[in-house]
Amino acid sequence: MGSPIVLGIESSCDETGAGLVQGGRLLGHAVASSMAEHARFGGVVPEIASRAHLHALRPVVRQALDEAGLTLSDIGAVAVTTGPGLSGALQVGLAGAKGIAYALDVPLYGVHHLAGHVAADTLTHGPLPDPCVVLIVSGGHTSLLLVRDLARDPILHLGDTLDDAAGECFDKVARVFGLPYPGGPAVDRAAREGDPRAVPFPRPLTGSRDEPYAFSFSGLKAAAARWAEGHTDGKLPVADGAASLQEAVADVLTRKAVAACAEYGVGTLVVVGGVAANSRVRSLAEERCRAAGIELRVPPLRLCTDNGAMIAAVGDFLVRAGAEPAPLDVSIDPSAPL
Ligand code: KG4
Ligand code: ZN
């Protein structure tokens, strides 16, 4: 008999995801997003997110099963994000996962959201080489990690953001530039028509000896806001601002990630999280990895942003590694460290 089919459930922020993985293979997955409902508030509203998860969870699990040609009774284990994330949102996913695990009498596994992002890449590119450096860049996180065996070894944090996450910086500056929410994709689109050298935005902490792999984006965000506010004639060159901002973020992220690979003698860099969708982050990472002889792995866009397949992928590792399942009274850990 092969390993069991693992259902993964993700509900830490505004995406409700369900995915099915068996023996490292993605069988099916589905995602529903409440992003549009948050748009007029300019950011995720926790209460709205929780209610949306409540509505979406069952249909999303159904859709993932349909895509895989499976039924509920085929599920042999359930994995669910327990943190970090929004408490109410996490509660909905965990309650749903517990219900399914209890009803089917199958083991339940609590999964760290960031471990999920790391594992997303394995669904398209196979097992992660040991060791590898992983850059997680999303709306909530910017972390540089040294990863060995996901199921067994703790992930080593090389550096994190000291303030805003890179995605948050994109989202907030986009607002100042008058671009729609979510700001990241809007900045990416606007940047196509702009000159990345138009505005010399700072590259925070790139020269730091004490914090070689730490990030800081609040100063860059403030610089972009000051630049925008300086254009009082109503003729803000948004495309140039967007291209220059994107260049600064991509430069900082890829410079530090490639330097970490060199220092730790690592031959593979994995870039995951919503910001890995950014076209300049991708192209600059490709350029710099090629120059340094590093293999670059970036999962496809649909697996880069929050989804249930990545949580199922971690559950699948845990099952196959013989890890202890979580008790059915396991709680959420909204501010979980990695
Ligand atoms: O991983 P994700 O879906 O959710 C978490 O934050 O966990 O990432 C969402 C973030 C948002 O800040 C969004 O603006 C950003 O990823 N993002 C992008 C792009 N697509 C999504 N940022 C820059 N360029 C993009 N193309
Ligand atoms: Zn995420």
Image: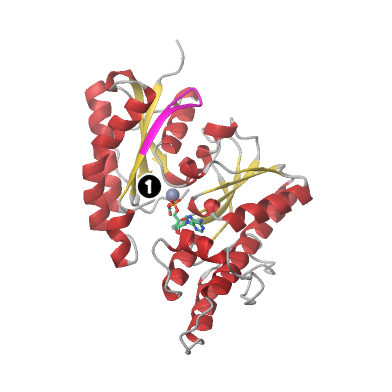
Q: Main secondary structure of the magenta part?
A: strand
Residue at the spot x=63%, y=63% of the render? Answer: 252
Q: Is residue 336 magenta?
A: no
Image location of residue 60, percent across then percent down: 30, 36
Q: Which residue is disc 1 drawn over?
A: 83
Q: Answer few, some or many: residues within 10 Å of disc 1's Cα (few below 14, many 20 plus, some between 14 and 19).
A: many
Which quadrant does the N terminus fall into?
top left
Q: Amino acid at mark 1?
A: Gly
Residue 152, above or below 55: above
Q: Tell me where the magenta segment starts and ends, as one range.
A: 20-30
Image location of residue 316, percent across then percent down: 45, 28
Residue 10, above or below 254: above
Residue 265, above or below 126: below
Image location of residue 90, percent across then percent down: 30, 47
Report the side of 279 relative to 92 (left or right): right
Q: What is the quadrant of residue 256 in the picture?
A: bottom right
Along the line of sight, the residue nearer the viewer: 116 or 189: 189
Q: How is the image coloured?
A: secondary structure
Can residue 63 be seen in this snapshot? yes
Report the side of 285 relative to 3 (left or right): right
